[in-house]
Image (spheres, rainbow, N blue to C red):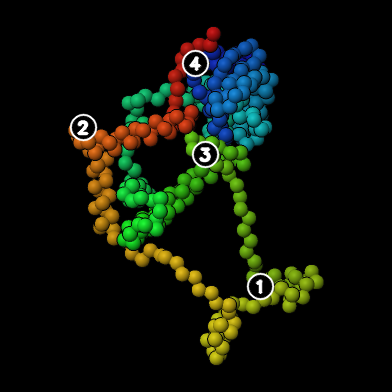
Amino acid sequence: MSFSASWHTLLDEAEAVSDEATIVTPITHTPFRLSDVQEHRIIIDYIEKDETRPLQFEQFETLYRGIHDEPNTEFALDRLPPDADPYAAVLSLHPRFEIDEDSGVIRESDLEATTQLHKPASDTDDDNERHEPDLQVYSDALLLTDTLERHEMTDIATIDTDALVNLYTILSDVQRSADDLRKDIADVLLNRLHHDRQVSGQFGSVQRTSRRNRTLKDEETVLNALETAGIDRERVTSVDRDKVDEALEVTELSESDLYEVDTTEYVRKADVDEDTKETRLQGLKDRLAASDEDDEEVQQLQEEIEELEDRIEELTSFSSGTSYHTGSKHG
């Protein structure tokens, strides 16, 4: 099948993309824009780095052939050469090609497909509205923020004991609930990351990696294998701690006769007053939900939130959840 017809369709689609529209690569989620569309190549400009790159017709044809050589016309994204993901992103502008990052493939479809082009986000879009998440970490973090704001944290040695107890308890809760949510998110991400390339978001990047764990087989299997290899059992046998503890119980030996004992003191959370936490939390939620424009405290809180949003916007030029205007043609 000739690639020529598909190439000219792709050129037409690329011509229709606005100069300000953002396309995002699969795998690394690198944003770029189309700066020029020519007969035998498409020129892109990376947004987060000062680099212009021509994408050549021949490489698009190679990717096209690779997709068509597969039985299901699906090409695994992790088979793309390094830095080739912009080709897949641009090819997805074609109405018959789409990227499925959950499955880790780019495929041809008889149905009109989705693209890597970020569409405009409306200010009235429900997806952009703030919602209170039903998550323990949200409640814990809200309480922690409020508690931190009520104390001078530059010198914690000057803080009263009861306040330090409150801080320690809430920090412990935040750590536990944050770890639980982080694990849930990691489980989902693991299915979306297909190799060791970094995937970037607004605040950082992640990558899939592996950890090698070893567990000895049963003792007899290990000892027999070592003896067969010429290793005496005595060279690999050691004192069994469980058996030592059993011996301590039936002899007059003391623990210090057999163990080096070192005592370390630490603080642990003993109890949590859930009623007090819930009362305080509800008060904070009521403050955030308040709509009285004449309330000076509410206005101050809203202004602080808006200032924080402005600072984040200044520091981050691209958001993977944000979209951009499309529609005008290249000149």
- Give percent across and percent down for residue 33: 54, 21
Closer to the N terminus: mark 1 or mark 2?
Answer: 1
Q: Distance between the residues labelled 2 and 4?
A: 40 Å
Find disc 3 in the rendering and name its residue: 204
Find disc 4 in the rendering and name its residue: 18
Q: Distance between the residues labelled 1 and 3?
A: 45 Å
- Give percent across and percent down for residue 91: 58, 23
Direction top: furthest residue: 331
What amino acid is at disc 2? Glu
Q: Which residue is drawn at 51% across and 14% down?
A: 16
Find disc 2 in the rendering and name its residue: 293
Q: What element carries label 1?
A: helix
Q: What element carries label 4?
A: loop
Residue depth check, mark 2 versus mark 4: number of the one nearer the observer: 2
Instruction: Answer few, some or many: residues within 10 Å of disc 3's Cα (few below 14, many 20 plus, some between 14 and 19).
Output: few
Of 98 and 209, nearer the camera is 209
| Quadrant location of the N terminus in the rendered image | top right
Direction bottom: furthest residue: 252
Proximity of marks 3 and 4: CB atoms separated by less than 8 Å: no
Instruction: Answer few, some or many: residues within 10 Å of disc 1's Cα (few below 14, many 20 plus, some between 14 and 19).
Output: few
Find disc 1 in the rendering and name its residue: 219
Closer to the N terminus: mark 3 or mark 4?
Answer: 4
Vertical comparison of 196 with 153: above or below: above
Instruction: Answer few, some or many: residues within 10 Å of disc 4's Cα (few below 14, many 20 plus, some between 14 and 19).
Output: some
Q: Which residue is drawn at 38% across and 35% down?
A: 308
Closer to the N terminus: mark 3 or mark 2?
Answer: 3
| Quadrant location of the C terminus in the rendered image | top right
Q: Is mark 2 on a helix, strand or loop?
A: loop
Closer to the N terminus: mark 1 or mark 4?
Answer: 4
Proximity of marks 1 and 2: CB atoms separated by less than 8 Å: no
